[in-house]
Amino acid sequence: MARLFPQIICGFFGVVLFVLYFLKAPSAKSLYLTITSDYWQIIFAFALLVGVASFIRVNIKKLSILSESPYVITGLLGLFAMPVMALVWGIKGDSPFMWVFENVQVPLQATVFALLAFFVASASLRGFKARSLPATILLISALIALLSRSDIFGWLGNSALEFSEWIRSYPSMSARRGILIGIGLGSVTTSLRIILGIERTWLGKDR
Amino acid sequence: MDPGTIVAGILTIAILSFLYGDNPVYKMAETLLVGVSMGYVLVITWTNTLMAVLFKPLFLESQFWLVIPFIFGLFMFGRFHKSTSFLSRYSMAVLIGSGAGVAIPAMLGARTLRQMTATVEMVQGDSFLTIFSGLVVVVGLFSTLSYFYFSREHEGIMGRSAKVGTYFLMIFFGTTFGYTVMSRVSTFIGRMDFLLSDFLHLTN
């Protein structure tokens, strides 16, 4: 029963949303929007709260480990400071909440993102070797994409830039389309399996 | 100097210190990022979703139908105890079931039929280059699809087509890789520009 009822609800919502997609009546459109917008947003918001609660639980457990405690305290301080600041001073443009967002979160995120440039570069140096024809094609197309916005391509003139644009807009895009169609067909198959109750892995294991 | 610039500069250096090796300063900055990001998302979700979409309409505007997603949302907390963990399956059932129902027509339309239409339309044109480019896309698309077709062994025409598909895939991976690296490098240049000019005042 603990697995059957959720499966019935899942199938019911699947069939209802599928049918609602094709109905033109305003009430049907409104119900479709209500479920895909409000229902989803609310349940996702609660899922986020569960995630935050879980994060706090795990970190409190880790507090007893002396070597980890400074990091745990820093993480928890960051987590609690934001809602406290929002409660006390609000979240308007000139509030301390936004100050922390602009001067702590944004630079940290941007630098972590930038740091990956080094790891991508070092991994590509080790991995990019023209051992076979496909590997050579990969290497050449990556080089064309990389150099297309550099001064080297600028010196070569417009035709070099046009060629790199052509590579991106035609051969590269055809493979991208192939992958997208594959994803589309795969999603349809998986969705059908879920609605019909063939795919049940999302139910997890009985605890 | 603006205190915000000092804080941002110190935190930027703390993250960049990872290039030297994993160290406590980097770990501190990393956990601070995790905590602050989670706190930010929590506040924004509370304000924009829970208050604006759920609590205000439910309790102030008497939109009682919102009780249904509210209950399904509360069921998510069932995961914290063994005896109530089954409740979260009901919330998941709503999300996954409705997601699957929406995905079938949406994926067939946007990801499959529209892509096919756009591909075929590309062959039409006046100049030789347009028609040639369109044919390249058609050949690339079908050869890529044949590479992912596993119901028949990749032998004969099928094998050759799949092999051509690999080349097109390599072009796609190569260009995607190139543009990804470029975006990362431009972000890095932005951070270095901030450090050297705004924070350290070494350049203009």
Image (spheres, coloured by chain):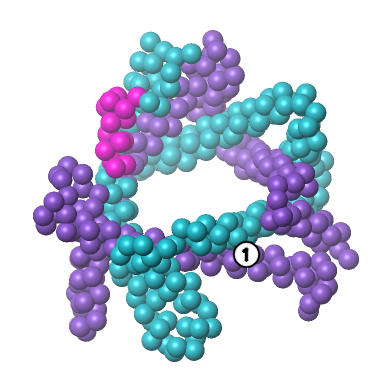
Q: Which residue is depicted at the point 15% across and 45% down?
A: B153
Q: Locate residue A35, reporting x and y percent.
A: 43, 36
Outermost right residue: B1
A46 relative position to A19: left or right: right
Outermost front residue: A131
Q: Locate residue B76, reporting x and y percent.
A: 54, 24
Q: Locate residue A134, reporting x and y percent.
A: 32, 62
Image quadrant assignment for residue B126: bottom left
Q: Which residue is depicted at the point 68% across and 25% down?
A: A57
> As rendered, which of A73 and B44 lies closer to the eye?
A73
User: Please, is residue B120 above or below residue A81 in the view?
Assistant: below
Q: Which residues are magenta?
A: A186-200
> As rendered, which of B203 and A17 lies closer to the eye?
B203
- The answer to whether any part of residue B172 appears in the image is no
Chain containing mark 1: B
B72 relative position to A97: left or right: left
Of the chain colours in the picture, the one used for chain A is cyan
Q: Which residue is mark 1?
A: B187
- In the image, residue A106 lies in the stretch drawn in magenta: no
Q: Which residue is depicted at the point 73% across and 44% down?
A: B27
Outermost left residue: B156
Of the chain colours in the picture, the one used for chain B is purple
Image quadrant assignment for residue B4: bottom right
Name the amino acid, label 1: Thr
Q: Secondary structure at mark 1?
A: helix
- In the image, residue A197 lies in the stretch drawn in magenta: yes
User: Tag 1: Cα neighbours inside 10 Å, few (<14), some, or many (≥20)?
Assistant: many
Q: Magenta region's main secondary structure? A: helix
Q: Locate residue A165, reporting x and y percent.
A: 39, 76
User: Please, is residue A177 above or below residue A189 in the view?
Assistant: below
Q: Which residue is depicted at the point 79% across and 60% down?
A: B9
- The answer to whether any part of residue A67 appears in the image is yes
